[in-house]
Image (cartoon, grey):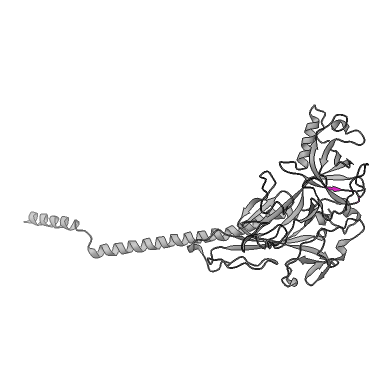
Amino acid sequence: MWRTSNASTRSSRRAGGRRGFSLIEAVVSLFILVVVMVMTFSLLSSMSAFAERQATFTLPRQSARRAASYLTYYLAGASDLNFSRFRDTPNLNSPAALITSYRLNGAVVQSTYNNLTGAETGNAVTVAGKETSFGDLGTDVVTVAFPESAIKIRIVEWTTAGLVSLNYAAGCDGSGGEDAANLSLFKTLTGDGPGARPLLPVLGDNGRWTYLQIKTYLDAVPGTTGCSEKAKTPPKVIQVQTMLTADAGFTTADPVPPVVTPPAAGTLPPELVEPIVLLAGVRHVSFRVKGSRLEQKAGLFDPNQDNPYPADPAAIRFLPIMEDVEDFQLSYLFDVAGELRQQGGDPLAGGLIAPVPRMSAQGVVGTQPCDSLVFTSGQVERAGLPPPAECVIGMRMSLTTRSRPLSLSARSQKTVRGRPKSEDHPKGPDDVIPNIYDRYHLTTTLILRNRLLGY
């Protein structure tokens, strides 16, 4: 009897052990699993959107700071290193650190612009409401002289035929190929390159200046030029053929301060007091925004070529250095009767668009053009004209950058709808797709260090 009972119990237990979940238990378990999965995916989606928002939030800020740091290196260091001009007349600053215009083939061309409109000479609107040939609508263009590896080289002769002889012998080491090595060093210093015609400042001891534009580097001629001549008088170690007025692409200063007379059958331009030196290692560099990209050119802005790019593939051209830059604005700072005044974007100007500083014809030592600046009607002026470029002591630079297009989940109601107002550039239209970009506006003030130091 007991055995039968025990067997029956074990059989019943085994049968109970094989019983599955009931329908209610399965539904409850499935419901719990779905809830957990929904919460997990919701959390992952939220974290992904947050990470994307953070990335898009950070990108325009990083871009603006990188662009500001890069531009500061060139703009704050702009100078033509005209020591003698400062030494003889302390209130006269570097005349060619900020290049606003120059002469090309005898015609005045502009190289620095405020708020491109498309109506400038040689410019045109290419994309309605967005771009012009010179750059993005409403943005600025600037050209400065930057001393990269500056060295003064004595000019010992300058003939009417444009032959210039210089005393440069850094590569003369007594070896068999010293003339070629010396010329190679000189080419490097003066920026020789494919399609390039180096344009370099020439300074007289009285502070007056002009440009020298190299056309051809001439090989040494034994007994006339080369390292063998360095101990002679005059030491014609290096000789170059310069551009003449009749040459296509001839470039000089505007309004040519001073108006340098072609040297007579003698030796040197009479306006430049000896010793006259060539400043090698001073480079011209230009910046603009084109297609929402910050671009740089190693040379003067040329409205005949940079519209937007020269047809010759070997010519020097603008190259993109940073993407997603929507706006680039500069306002110029002046010392007016001991007070810092701003030209362009000044709130006191009542929204007026300020003209760029002009290249002054003041080349006579003894005048002090920066002492007679006045601030009237919200603008800095001198004798009713825009202030001279040599009186600029600093710049206020404003950059607007933006993110890449945001996904729907990463968009926020807090994003800026359209490019914000910057200096004297009004706010842009709202984006067609709301909240598609995150934007960042950065403003920094730059003081031209070299002008504070006196050159």
Please name the residue shown 88% across and 29% down the image: 223
Q: Is 415 in front, or is 208?
A: 208
Give the image location of residue 9, x and y in percent. 13, 57
Considering every residue shown, the one lying at the far left of the view is 1
Q: Is residue 98 visible?
A: no
Q: Is residue 338 magenta?
A: no
Q: Is 108 in front, or is 74?
A: 108
Give the image location of residue 404, x and y in percent. 55, 58
Q: In this image, 61 relative to 377: left or right?
A: left
Magenta extent: 201-206
Whether 222 is drawn above or below 80: the answer is above
The quarter of the picture where the N terminus appears is bottom left
Q: Is 44 in front, or is 167?
A: 167
Considering every residue shown, the one lying at the far front of the view is 246
Give the image location of residue 96, x and y in percent. 81, 54
Q: In this image, 281 relative to 419: left or right?
A: right
Q: Is residue 412 visible?
A: yes
Identify the image quadrant of residue 338: bottom right
